[in-house]
Structure formats: C-alpha cells, structure tokens
Amino acid sequence: MTINEKYDNVFIEKFSVKASELSTLKYQEVSGWDSVGHMELIAALEEVFDISLDTDDIIDFSSYEKGKEILKKYNISL
Amino acid sequence: MEENNRVLSFDAFELQKYEPNRYPYLYIDRVTECVPGKYAKGYKNFTNNEWFFPIHYPGHPFVPGSIQIETLSQMVTVAFTTMPEIKDINVIGCQVSAKWNREVYPGDRLDIEAFITFFSRGICKGYAKSYVDGELACEISVVQAIPSELDKYKPRVTKKA
C-alpha cells in the first residue's frame, strides 16, 4: 500500500466516505469528524505512520488537504 | 489502599474522588482493585430499595439495561480517572454498545470488571463485563471523553461569512 493509500484509507474507514469525497473533507463538515472523531483520526494517523503529532499540528489539522501539508513536517510526503 | 505499587482500592466514599456521579445516579458501591489506566474491579449491590424496581416491572423487578450500562460505564471511568495526569473527572459518554445475558434482580450483587484499551488526549476506550454469582450478566464496550482535554486539540475553524 502506498503512503497516499494509507492516508486515504484512514479517512475512508474513519468517516465512511468514498475516495472521491476525500479532497473536500473538513472538520465538522462531515459526519463523525467532531472533537472525538478528530482525536481518533489523529490517533489512527499516528499509528499508521508511526509518528507523534505536536499539539499545534493537531489543532491545525482541519481538513484532509491541510493534513497533507502538516504531515510533510514529519517526512510523510503525500 | 496501596499506592506504592499502584494497585488501589476504594470504599464507597473514596471512589467519589474519581466518579463524578452522585445519589441517586452513582451506581458503583466499591472498587476492590484498580490499576490506574489499566483496569478497575468492584461491585454494585442492588437492593429492594432501588427506585426503579417498583416500576421495572411491577411484579417482576429487574435492573433496567440502561442502568446496567451506566453501572459498567462508571467502573470504566474509575479505571482511567485514577491516572495521576487526570485533573478533571467530568467525563462524557461518546459511544456504547452492550449485550445482556441474564436479568439482575433485587438482592443481586453485580461484580464488575472494567478494562482500558486506549487512552490518549482525553479519549478513553474500554470495555467492562459484569457477573452475578459468577454468571455473565452484561458486557459493554464504551468510548468516553474528558471535554476539557478535548478542547485543547480542537482544530481552528474559520466560520463562513
């Protein structure tokens, strides 16, 4: 599985969305991405990529696309 | 209470430091064994004097399933609010699934074992099983959260004009 597929799968499984919907996913704009869902998303990404996100990055992680930018700081190129 | 090796136990008063519910909604009586962040075991005695027995049901009293869920959830709460890093014990329930195997009657003691499977940044996942005289009565899996912790990590959202 590629890095991009791993990243996508976390969102697809967590929020039960299709791949075609990923690019528009944002916090509180999809069912399940509330504060609890957000922490579960972060935990899942940390496990998949074996990283530990800083608090500021967790707060900034407000969308699928924004997440890609943030993960570059952790040497995850998407 | 033994704190040196972190295996704790609490009587009916001590456990209230870790469980925010009070009468008539505090549904655990004693925590007999607790390793903070790992598990908590204890029990609830259901007496003839419970408010719900006369109405659930008249002539055939047994503990409502919702009360059993609450009872087991409260033991899960104690299993993680006893962690030294937890300062706020005001916990909310986020998700629960339950299965019941037998009825619980007046006079029964419900023995409860609760385990934590995940805790991070204010989110706790766990499960609990309960028994009457060694027979499985109810089991749940649950997600709980501490809102004051979650609030620290909420994404910044720019509201649309």
Image (cartoon, rainbow, N blue to C red):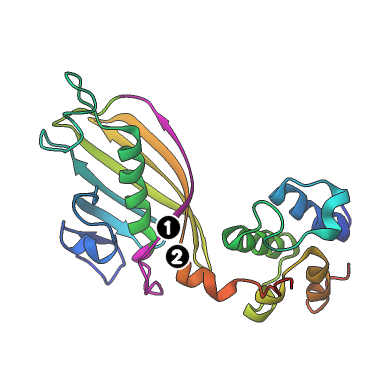
Q: Position of residue B159 (x, y in %)?
A: 70, 72
The residue where tag 2 is placed is B146
Instruction: Name the image quarter holding the N terminus of chain B.
Output: bottom left
Position above or below: B43 against B77: above
Bounds of the magenta span?
A: B81-102
Q: Residue at x 17, y 38 (%)?
A: B51
Residue A16: x, y in percent?
73, 45
* Residue ID for mark 1: B92
Q: Position of residue A42 (x, y in %)?
A: 66, 64
**For numbered disc 1, what is the local secondary structure?**
strand
- In magenta stretch: residue B89: yes
Residue A23 visible in the snapshot: yes
Kindly identify the residue that appears in the image at 16 percent across and 30 percent down. B106
The quarter of the displayed image where residue B21 is located:
bottom left
Q: Is residue A25 left or right of residue B148?
A: right
The three-letter amino acid code for the residue at tag 2 is: Ile
Residues tagged 1 and 2 counted as in contact (Cβ below 8 A): yes
Whether residue A53 is visible, yes or no, is no
Query: In the rendered view, would you say B137 is above or below B76?
Result: above
